[in-house]
Amino acid sequence: MSKEPTRNGDDRSGQLSRREFLARSAGAATALAAVGGAAWLFGTRTPPPAQPPARQAFTLPDFALQDHGPAMAIVTGADRARTATAAMDLLGGMGRFIRPGDRVLLKVNAAFASPAMLSATTHPELVAAVTKLCLSAGASAVLVGDNPINDPSSCFALTGIGPAATSAGAKLMLPSDGAFAPTTLAGGRLIRDWPVLAGPLAGVTKLIGLAPLKHHERSGASMTMKNWYGLLGGRRNTFHQDINGIIQELAMLVRPTLVILDATTAMMRNGPTGGSLDDLKATHTMIVGTDQVAVDAFGATLLDKTSDDLPYLGMAAAAGAGTADWASLNPRRADVAQPPSAVRRPT
């Protein structure tokens, strides 16, 4: 039987059955209501049109800091807020990357309408923690966005990302009419006059990617570079025929300020949707860095994979997007289970 494409062009293989979806939705709704987030489930849902209106060509800004070399931190621990904060401290604090007045976009993975416990999407605890760190550093606004596979309102509600973002002081940016604009990657084979989610990027001065660590049926692993796939519109499932090529081009197209790979719980199999707690492993690690290739190369080790298992890592490195030799960056490390004095900012 052929696979029915969604409005964004991703096929529905590996998604939940109706019974499973309703069961998870009910559980997630109860959890959201307990924290005051039930309104997300019952508000107006306005998904973007299948064919957004034509817009002027859009060029993604370069959000990477030019005055800092590659930096990377690896922190172990089970509490996402603590590990993320400790990792930023090791890199000099969020104030090293976010300056007063910055408008920050947190590009999350909200692809599926599934609860956070399944680790298929960015965890709401991480969204809240990073939002607060950015605001404390003086950001004038923090935006949270993605172009989900399922209905956007449902995805942001059931994952808990929407309530967590707004409660922490961020503004949620749902895909909407006119939010997409065509872009072309210079020298690219695949990203040519392709619609990208330009609306949330308007006026943004810093970009941070927040991705869960998980297995992926097609690419082998979904991490920070694959997370930019959620900026694409149109029938993006056509890129599945060259999944390594599109991830390489996304790494060339998007130059973030920071990427954060949440490996507190890793999806070891049946990704990207998962669906069972048996697919998960407690890896208790948070990786933060300015080099998305290096961050993903380390993340691969937690999935028991090497760079050879994930061709896009070497391809992105060869294209100049970063290094797959993560150890060459001499990442700073800490364990938040240790006393606070063990986690120090660099002098």
Image (tube, grey):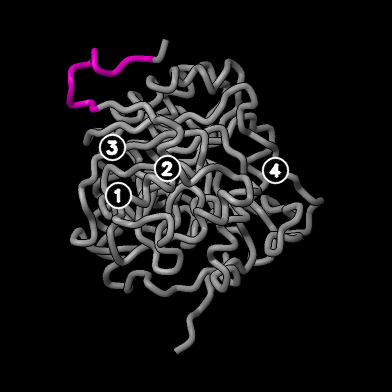
The residue positioned 25% from the left and 46% from the top of the image is 31
The label on residue 35 is: 3
Measured in 3D between alpha carbons, the distance from the residue under mark 1 to the one under mark 2, in whole angstroms, is: 28 Å
Residue 128 seen by the camera: yes
Measured in 3D between alpha carbons, the distance from the residue under mark 1 to the one under mark 3, in whole angstroms, is: 32 Å
Magenta run includes residue 122: no
Would you place residue 226 above or below residue 292 in this image?
below
Residue mark closest to the camera, 1 vs 3:
1
Residue 171 seen by the camera: no
Q: Amino acid at mark 2?
A: Gly
Q: Secondary structure at mark 2?
A: helix
Measured in 3D between alpha carbons, the distance from the residue under mark 3 to the one under mark 2, in whole angstroms, is: 12 Å
| Of the image marks 3 and 2, the number of the one nearer the N terminus | 3
Measured in 3D between alpha carbons, the distance from the residue under mark 3 to the one under mark 4, in whole angstroms, is: 36 Å
Magenta residues (range): 335-345
- The residue that label 2 is drawn on is 162
Q: Is residue 19 left or right of residue 185?
A: left
- The residue that label 4 is drawn on is 60
The residue positioned 24% from the left and 17% from the top of the image is 342
| Of the image marks 1 and 2, the number of the one nearer the N terminus | 2
Q: Amino acid at mark 1?
A: Leu
The image position of residue 192, as x and y in percent, is 74, 61
Residue mark closest to the camera, 3 vs 4:
4
Seen from this angle, which residue lies furthest right?
56
Measured in 3D between alpha carbons, the distance from the residue under mark 1 to the one under mark 4, in whole angstroms, is: 31 Å
| Of the image marks 1 and 4, the number of the one nearer the N terminus | 4
The image position of residue 136, as x and y in percent, is 45, 17
- The residue that label 1 is drawn on is 302
Q: How many marks?
A: 4
